[in-house]
Each structure stands twice: as C-alpha cells, then as structure tokens.
C-alpha cells in the first residue's frame, strides 16, 4: 500500500481499517454464535485481503477531490459521496457470493457456514469503516495519496471595526472554554470508568468465580 500511495499517513489510514473491521467482526460473530474454529479463522484470513478494498477506493476518490481544489473537509465529504454507491454495490455483490452458503444444508453447510458468514460480516464491517472512519481520518490531514500541496491554515477572525472586537474576543474565549469543557468531560469519563473497573468490576469478578466454582 505504501509503494502505491507513497504517503505514510494514507498508508496508516488504510492499515487502520484492517484491524478495526476484523475486531468488529468478532463482536458480530459472538452475536451469531460463531466460535473461533478452523473454518471461521479461514474466513477471516480470506477477508483480510478484501476489507481494505473499499477503503482504498474511498481514499483515492478523496485525493481526486483535493486535486480539484476542494478543502480538506469538503474533499472528504464530496469524495466519499461520489463513490459511495459504487462501493456499496461492489460490497453487496461480494456478500451475495458468500452469504447463500450459510443456508446450505447437510455436511457442506456445516463445513462452510462459519466461513461464509464470517467473510460476509467482515466485508460489511469494512464497508461501514470505509464510509465513516476513512473520510474522518482523511479530513485530519491535508496531504493525501497524490501529494498535492497542503491547504493553508485559516486565519483567525480579527475584525477591523472597533465595535466588533469584543465579539471576536468573546468568540475566542468561548472556543477555549469549549475545548476545556471537552477535555474535562473526557477526563471525567475516564476517571469514572477506572473507578467502576476498580470498585465494581473486580468484586463482580470475584463473586462470579465464587459462584461458578464447583
């Protein structure tokens, strides 16, 4: 991927879609009652090369939108919209190949059901990741696969009229307070989560071990 895209950030974005899609697949495998056996792991191995296809297509479309002179965020939105239907159609076509194997009965169904369902889930997860995570990460950095020039930073609003200067100052204060508020909320959520794990999770684990213990 790095050889073709020639950019470290774009390679990181594409590479990040791979573990996220597979980890999300584990959750739905558990919901469908699938275990990690030879067939399901084989399905994950086959899906490994498929889950990055949609992400590469979306990222390339965003790069083309940036070449046309669009901004970073606008290019992420427009580039994703241009290929969204094509990506959905190609993904559903691939799913339509494997999903009917889930309904096969007999020995063949028992052999290939886990594998086919795992591949279908992984490909659908890659579709969601390519339409959500990839545009978001692409909008965080101006440089994209084809190495077009970076977008100049937006200047801070400084009004010339004296009556509007207090408004600009109030705007900067509100922006800083909002940033501190978000940081405080993240800190609070992290602290509460750690306290729950420490004072609630461990006793529940001990109780569970005591109950399950024969």
Image (cartoon, rainbow, N blue to C red):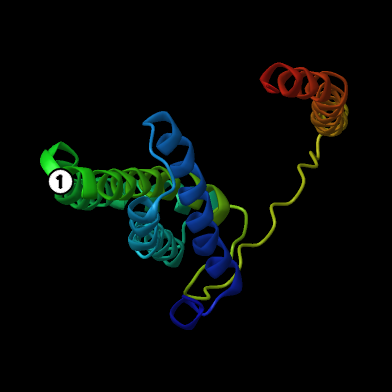
Identify which residue, 157 or 119, lies in the foreground. Answer: 119
Q: Is residue 162 visible?
A: no
**At 84% across and 29% down in the image, what residue appears?**
194
Residue at the front extreme, as displayed: 214
| Residue situated in front as seen by the camera: 100 or 67 | 100
* Residue appearing at x 23%, y 49% in the figure: 111
Tag 1 secondary structure: helix
Q: Which residue corresponds to the image point at 42% horizontal and 41% vertical from the top-left?
A: 35
Label 1 crowd bin: few (<14), some (14–19), many (20+), radius 10 Å: few
Using the rendered image of the protein, determine whether residue 198 is visible from the camera's viewpoint: yes
13, 211: nearer the viewer = 211
Q: Where is residue 187 in the image (x, y as percent from the top left)?
A: 86, 31
Q: Name the residue under label 1.
A: 107
Q: Residue furthest bottom?
A: 3
Quadrant of the frame with the C terminus: top right
Q: In this view, does 57 lie to the left or right of 113?
A: right
Q: Name the residue: 40% across, 44% down.
A: 125
Q: Is residue 199 above or below residue 28?
A: above
Q: Residue 26 or 146: which is nearer the viewer?
A: 26
Where is residue 12, by image quadrant?
A: bottom right
Where 207 falls versus 149 (above or below)?
above
Q: In this view, does 23 lie to the left or right of 48?
A: right
């Amino acid at each position: 991927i790095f050889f073709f895209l020639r950019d470290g950030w774009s390679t990181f974005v594409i590479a990040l879609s791979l573990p996220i899609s597979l980890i999300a697949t584990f959750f739905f495998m558990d919901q469908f009652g699938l275990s990690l056996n030879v067939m399901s792991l084989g399905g994950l191995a086959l899906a490994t090369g498929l889950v990055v296809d949609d992400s590469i297509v979306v990222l390339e479309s965003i790069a083309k939108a940036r070449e046309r002179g669009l901004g970073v965020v606008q290019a992420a939105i427009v580039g994703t919209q241009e290929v969204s239907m094509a990506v959905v159609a190609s993904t559903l076509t691939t799913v339509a190949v494997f999903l009917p194997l889930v309904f096969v009965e007999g020995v063949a169904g028992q052999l290939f059901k886990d594998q086919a369902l795992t591949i279908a889930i992984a490909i659908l997860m890659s579709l969601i990741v390519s339409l959500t995570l990839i545009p978001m990460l692409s909008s965080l950095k101006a440089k994209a696969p084809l190495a077009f020039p970076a977008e100049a930073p937006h200047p801070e609003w400084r009004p010339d009229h004296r009556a509007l200067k207090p408004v600009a100052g109030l705007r900067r204060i509100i922006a800083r307070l909002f940033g501190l508020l978000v940081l405080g909320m993240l800190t609070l959520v992290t602290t509460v989560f750690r306290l729950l794990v420490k004072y609630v999770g461990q006793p529940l684990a001990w109780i569970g071990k005591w109950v399950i213990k024969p």
